[in-house]
Image (cartoon, rainbow, N blue to C red):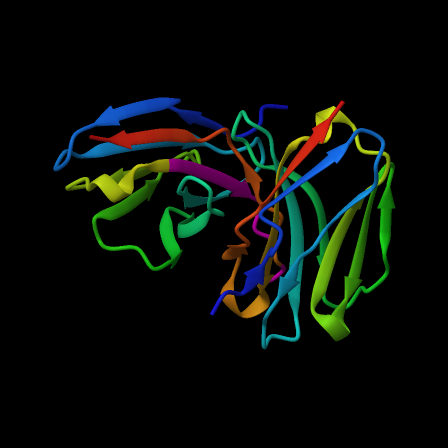
């Protein structure tokens, strides 16, 4: 079974639009971490955020915000006022305390921001 | 502060050959994980090295092996290459903090093409 599901394969928006990338996860562990990474065309995965299972506070960092809801097993990522430089593939990942640093990645969402 | 580096950037091999990929972790990190990312997919965990030993392994055959050196750098070896081994191979480093789930920082990857 897929531990992390990113149902949106590709999203296209026009610059300055807001966009939300969905992430749904599955785990039986009570202690786990969720991550978001950005992969630009260069290929390197860039770390964006990490959130542990005991902290459901939403987080905002500049134009980026994350909404973590354990009740729906979701960890969604919103970009406000998108820019062309936000164009990339975004990955959500899960790591479980019982599985020692093994990251399970979703299949990614490709975001195209058009000028 | 040097990030994760990988070499080579690109590699072309033929079926049946063997390949070695190299990774130097981010300064201060002691743990290296390897991932395989097929085109259009999320990264898949291959294995993780800590204190020069394989600490955890994903669902990959024994053709995939690795090594970690005293300076924490690592190699990934793949024997008897198959066409399906064509992928982007990503190295990630982290600092083991004894039980907590550590954020992994990724290198730019090695693009392996098997003909």
Q: Name the residue rendered at 50%, 65% in the picture.
A: A2
Q: Quadrant of residue B87?
A: top left
Which of A3/B99 is in front?
A3
Magenta span contains residue B97: yes
> How many numbered circles are shown?
0
Which of B100/A86 is in front?
A86
Q: Quadrant of residue A62?
A: top right
Can you give x and y, in whole percent of width and height, for residue A92 in the image? 62, 51
Question: In this picture, which residue range is highlighted in magenta?
Answer: B88-100
Magenta span contains residue A53: no
B37 left or right, relative to A12: left
Q: Quadrant of the N terminus of chain B?
A: top right
Relative to residue A85, is residue B78 depicted above or below? below
A56 left or right, relative to A50: right
Q: Name the residue rendered at 47%, 70% in the picture.
A: A1
Relative to residue B8, is residue B52 depicted above or below? below
């Amino acid at each position: 079974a897929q531990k992390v599901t990113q149902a949106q394969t590709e999203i296209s928006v026009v610059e300055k639009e807001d966009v939300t990338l969905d992430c749904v996860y599955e785990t039986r562990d009570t202690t786990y971490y969720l991550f978001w990474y950005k992969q630009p065309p260069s290929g390197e995965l860039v770390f964006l955020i990490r959130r542990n299972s005991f902290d459901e506070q939403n987080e905002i960092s500049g134009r980026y915000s994350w909404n973590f809801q354990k009740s729906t097993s979701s960890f969604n990522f919103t970009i406000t006022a998108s820019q062309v430089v936000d164009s990339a593939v975004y990955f959500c990942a899960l790591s479980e305390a019982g599985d020692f640093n093994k990251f399970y990645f979703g299949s990614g969402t490709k975001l195209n921001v058009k000028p | 502060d040097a990030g994760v580096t990988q070499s080579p950037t690109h590699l072309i091999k033929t079926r049946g050959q063997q390949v070695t990929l190299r990774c130097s972790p981010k300064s201060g990190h002691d743990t290296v994980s390897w991932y395989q990312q097929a085109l259009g997919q999320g990264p898949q965990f291959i294995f993780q090295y800590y204190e020069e030993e394989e600490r955890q392994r994903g669902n990959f055959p024994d053709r995939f092996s690795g090594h970690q050196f005293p300076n924490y750098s690592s190699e990934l070896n793949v024997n008897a290459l198959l066409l399906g081994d064509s992928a982007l191979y990503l190295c990630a480093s982290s600092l083991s903090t004894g039980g907590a789930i550590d954020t992994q920082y990724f290198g730019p990857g090695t693009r392996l093409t098997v003909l």
